[in-house]
Amino acid sequence: MSLGIVFAINILIKSSIMKELIEKITSKVGITPEQATNTINAVAEYVKDKLPVPFHKAIDSALNGESLGDGIKAQIEGLGGNILETAEELKGKAEEFGENLKDKLSGLFGGDKK
């Protein structure tokens, strides 16, 4: 288990939602609180393995009593800035490429050579 997961687990154990979830599992399934904690951790790890890394924090947030939707929204907004920057950079390169191509083709067909 990675250090990050251990750290997240320690935070989750202290949270009220985690305590509530442990109590619910122990009463419904009939296992010890430690077994319930291990089960929750295993499920959280499994879910994280199935989702892209940017959503891992959202899972931790949900287990910590925060809104899963807010956690995902924050992750998407964080990605959005990077996407916009990359799109602007690609736009600039495409425009430059287009101008260079236009100049070269113009020279081939009798236009001004540059």
Image (cartoon, rainbow, N blue to C red):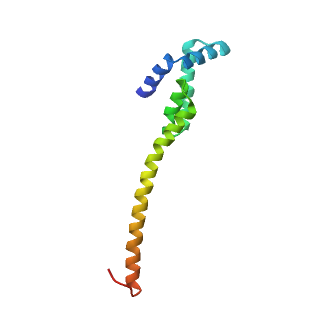
Q: Quadrant of residue 63?
A: top right
Q: Residue at x 43, y 48 (%)?
A: 82
Q: Quadrant of the C terminus?
A: bottom left
Q: Residue at x 46, y 24 (%)?
A: 8
Q: In the rendering, at what x and y percent does residue 55 appear?
A: 51, 37
Q: In the rendering, at what x and y percent does residue 46 appear?
A: 55, 31
Q: Quadrant of the N terminus?
A: top left
Q: Quadrant of residue 34?
A: top right
Residue found at the very far bottom of the displayed protein = 110
How many callouts does the rendering have? 0
Q: In the rendering, at what x and y percent does residue 57 appear?
A: 49, 32
Q: In the rendering, at what x and y percent does residue 109 appear?
A: 41, 86
Q: Nearer the viewer, residue 81 or 39?
A: 81
Q: Residue at x 50, y 21 (%)?
A: 12
Q: Residue at x 43, y 23 (%)?
A: 7
Q: Nearer the viewer, residue 38 or 106?
A: 106
Residue found at the very far left of the displayed protein = 114
Q: Is residue 12 above or below residue 93?
A: above
Q: Is residue 34 left or right of residue 5?
A: right
